[in-house]
């Protein structure tokens, strides 16, 4: 099998997933040390906060005045995820070792990527930005999202001591 046949199977979707994993792995290994862990908790928190923000005093009317476009929804979700990520990474940073093993970095990066994909597939405004291929979309179909979310949390347990 020649190289062109191998590269024919590598689509932009897999490159996006690989880059996302590499970024989360780098955060987990060399940055915050809890980067992937914080993403697992921050992304669902951002969804929850977005649902609450629509009915909140002052902020709710401001958000609704911008109109209802997918880009606006994504910007709001990313802003809320960034705030949640900062808060959760500061809270979770105390519970992790100062040196991170490659296994811990890989499992937290995989968990973070799984949670990002789950949220990507359940949020229509985010899903409108990029439509993953049929193979990835079938893996993250609605009937499997609970199990993928649970798998992300279980992955966080694997490198922990005493488990």
Image (cartoon, rainbow, N blue to C red):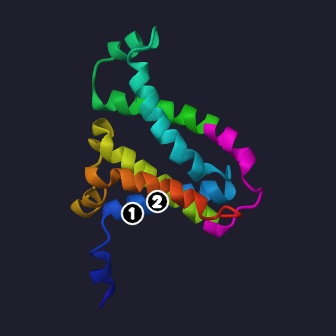
Query: Residue 142: x, y in percent?
Result: 27, 49
Q: Which of these two is toward me, 108 or 151?
A: 151
At a point 29% along the width and 61% down the height, the residue shown is: 139
At a point 38% along the width and 10% down the height, the residue shown is: 61
* Quadrant holding the C terminus: bottom right
**Residue 158 against residue 112 in the figure, above or below:** below
Query: Residue 32: x, y in percent?
Result: 68, 49
* Quadrant holding the N terminus: bottom left
Q: What's the magenta region?
A: 88-103
**Residue 98 against residue 75 in the figure, above or below:** below
Q: Are marks 2 and 1 in contact (CB under 8 Å)?
A: yes
Q: Secondary structure at mark 1?
A: helix
Residue at numbered disc 2: 19
Query: Residue 41: x, y in percent?
Result: 53, 43
Q: Which of these two is toward me, 48 or 16?
A: 48
Regarding residue 76, the answer to whether it shows in the image is yes
């Amino acid at each position: 099998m020649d190289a062109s046949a191998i590269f024919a199977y590598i689509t932009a979707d897999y490159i996006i997933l690989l880059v996302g994993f590499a970024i989360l792995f780098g955060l987990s290994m060399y940055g915050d040390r809890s980067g992937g862990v914080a993403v697992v908790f921050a992304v669902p928190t951002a969804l929850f906060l977005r649902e609450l923000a629509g009915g909140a005093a002052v902020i709710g009317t401001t958000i609704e005045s911008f109109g209802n476009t997918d880009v606006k929804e994504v910007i709001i979700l990313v802003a809320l995820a960034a705030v949640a990520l900062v808060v959760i990474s500061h809270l979770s940073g105390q519970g992790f070792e100062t040196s991170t093993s490659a296994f811990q970095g890989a499992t937290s990066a995989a968990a973070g990527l799984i949670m990002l994909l789950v949220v990507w597939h359940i949020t229509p405004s985010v899903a409108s930005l990029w439509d993953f291929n049929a193979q990835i979309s079938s893996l993250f179909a609605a009937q499997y999202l609970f199990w993928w979310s649970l798998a992300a949390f279980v992955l966080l347990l694997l490198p922990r001591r005493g488990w």
